Image (spheres, grey):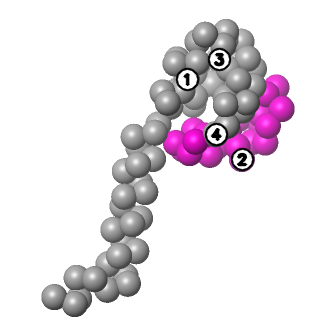
């Protein structure tokens, strides 16, 4: 059936797939940041990244290893604690 492959249906399916992928890429950054009573802005400033970057990472988007390193250190963790924050 041609209606199964309408543009709207394809966009909807793609959107759902992206949403599911983000859920799989979740990390514990928000949980750890809030446990340390840090705001996104404070963490961003300490790590030397933008607050938007922190939001994106908390929403499951990937980031560079250098950014992960900055965030881990800004949280007062050791680099060997990477798995406590990032699951990749």
Mark 1 residue crowding within 10 angstroms, few (<14) / some (14–19) / many (20+)? many
- The kind of secondary structure element at disc 2 is helix
| Location of mark 4 (residue) | 63
Residue 61 in the image: x percent, y percent?
A: 56, 45
* Position of residue 37 measured from the top left corner of the image (x, y, whole percent): 66, 21
Residue 52: mark in rendering: 2
- Looking at the picture, how far across and down is residue 5, in whole percent? 28, 83
Say whether marks 4 and 1 touch (CB < 8 Å). no
Give the distance between the C-alpha atoms of the residues marked 3 and 1, in whole angstroms. Answer: 13 Å
Left or right, 80 with reference to 53:
left
The residues tagged by marks 4 and 1 sit, at their Cα atoms, a distance apart of 12 Å
Q: Is residue 71 visible?
A: no
Q: Where is mark 3, residue-wise? A: 36
What secondary structure characterizes most of the magenta part?
Answer: helix
Q: Residues within 10 Å of mark 3 (few under 14, many from 20)?
A: few
Going from the N terminus, do you reach mark 4 or mark 1 first?
Answer: 4
Give the magenta range. 39-62
64 or 30, which lies in front? Answer: 64
For marks 1 and 2, the one nearer the N-term is 2
């Amino acid at each position: 059936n041609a209606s199964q492959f309408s543009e709207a249906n394809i966009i909807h399916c793609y959107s759902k797939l992206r949403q599911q992928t983000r859920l799989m890429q979740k990390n514990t950054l928000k949980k750890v940041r809030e446990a340390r009573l840090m705001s996104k802005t404070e963490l961003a400033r300490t790590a030397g990244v933008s607050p938007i970057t922190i939001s994106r990472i908390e929403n499951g988007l990937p980031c560079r290893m250098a950014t992960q390193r900055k965030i881990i250190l800004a949280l007062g963790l050791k680099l060997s604690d990477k798995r406590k924050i990032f699951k990749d």
